[in-house]
Amino acid sequence: MNEPLPDRLSADETSPHYNAALLEKGVGVRFKGVEKTNVEEYCISEGWVRLTVGNTRDRRGRPMTVKLKGPVEVYYRDAPDSAPEGEKA
């Protein structure tokens, strides 16, 4: 069985919330019920995601992001019960 996902996770290697082992397993994020593939960081308890904005970079070479608030759901992508309700076979 997979371990539970953390409340907060970041894809930025310089962040204290970065976890390479979890990211390799494949973590999926639904924000306001919509699957998001450009999530840089999320926090379930505070209800926000940080999404990358196109291919733009800041002066340090990191992706530019925007922080949006709303309900956040996370799951393992490879788990058989992770499919949305309408897509279960």
Image (cartoon, rainbow, N blue to C red):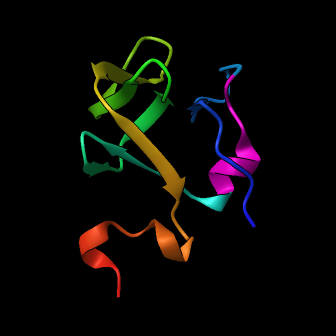
- The quadrant of the rendering that contains the N terminus is bottom right
- The quadrant of the rendering that contains the C terminus is bottom left
- Residue nearer the viewer, 87 or 22: 87
The residue that appears at 47% across and 23% down in the rendered structure is 62
The residue that appears at 50% across and 14% down in the rendered structure is 60
Quick check: is 22 in the magenta stretch? yes
* The quarter of the displayed image where residue 52 is located: top left
Q: What are the residue bounds of the magenta stretch? A: 17-24
* The quarter of the displayed image where residue 48 is located: top left
Which residue lies most toward the front here? 85
Which residue lies most toward the bottom here? 89
Residue 27: percent from left, percent from top? 54, 53
* The quarter of the displayed image where residue 39 is located: top left
Residue 87: percent from left, percent from top? 28, 77
Residue 21: percent from left, percent from top? 75, 50
Work out whether residue 55 can be spotted. Answer: no
Work out whether residue 71 can be spotted. Answer: yes
